[in-house]
Amino acid sequence: MRKKKPTLIGAQLRTARLAAELTQVELAKKTGVGQKYISDLECDRRRPTIDHLRLIAKACRCGFAIDTSGVVTIS
């Protein structure tokens, strides 16, 4: 059985959301997704699509980068 490699994107998303002074509900409304989806992303239960990353970054007034190995960094 393969071990699931943990991602740190959830913590980065939460940090960006809090820095933008948004609640999960507010971020969900700004991005057109459900609050549960935002919660799942922040808890690393789901991985965001590129389109959702763009929407979240825009709503939080931040940027993101994806390196060649697929690691996402939110700034």
Image (tube, rainbow, N blue to C red):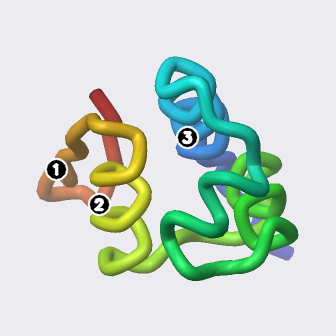
Query: Please, is residue 59 above or below residue 31 in the view?
Result: above
Which residue matches tag 1? 67
Give residue 23's position: percent from left, percent from top: 74, 40
**Disc 3 residue type?**
Leu
- In-front residue for pair 37/70: 37
Choose mark 1 or mark 3, whichever is in front. Answer: 3
* Mark drawn on residue 13: 3
SS type, badge 3 = helix
Where the N terminus falls, by quadrant? bottom right
69 with respect to 43 (left or right): left
Q: In which quarter of the image is residue 15?
A: top right
Q: Which amino acid does label 1 sit on?
A: Asp
Count of numbered labels shown in the rendering: 3
Q: Which residue is located at x 24 percent, y 45 percent?
A: 64
Q: Compared to 5, does 34 lie above or below? A: below
Mark 2 secondary-structure assignment: loop
Marker disc for residue 70: 2
| Residue furthest out toward the left | 68
Say few, some or many: other residues with alpha carbon within 10 Å of mark 2 (under 14 / 14 to 19 / 20 or more): few
Q: Do the residues labelled 1 and 3 touch (CB within 8 Å)?
A: no
Residue at image position (65%, 44%) is: 10
Q: What residue type is labelled 2?
A: Gly
Which residue is nearer to you in this view: 20 or 4?
Answer: 20
Q: Position of residue 68 (x, y in %)?
A: 13, 57
N-term mark: 1 or 3:
3
Label 1, label 3: how far apart the Cα atoms are = 17 Å
Mark 3 Cα shell of 10 Å, populated few (<14), some (14-19), many (≥20): many
Residue 69, given in percent of the width and then of the height, sits at 24, 57
Query: Which residue is pictured at 43% across the width and 57% down the height?
Result: 56
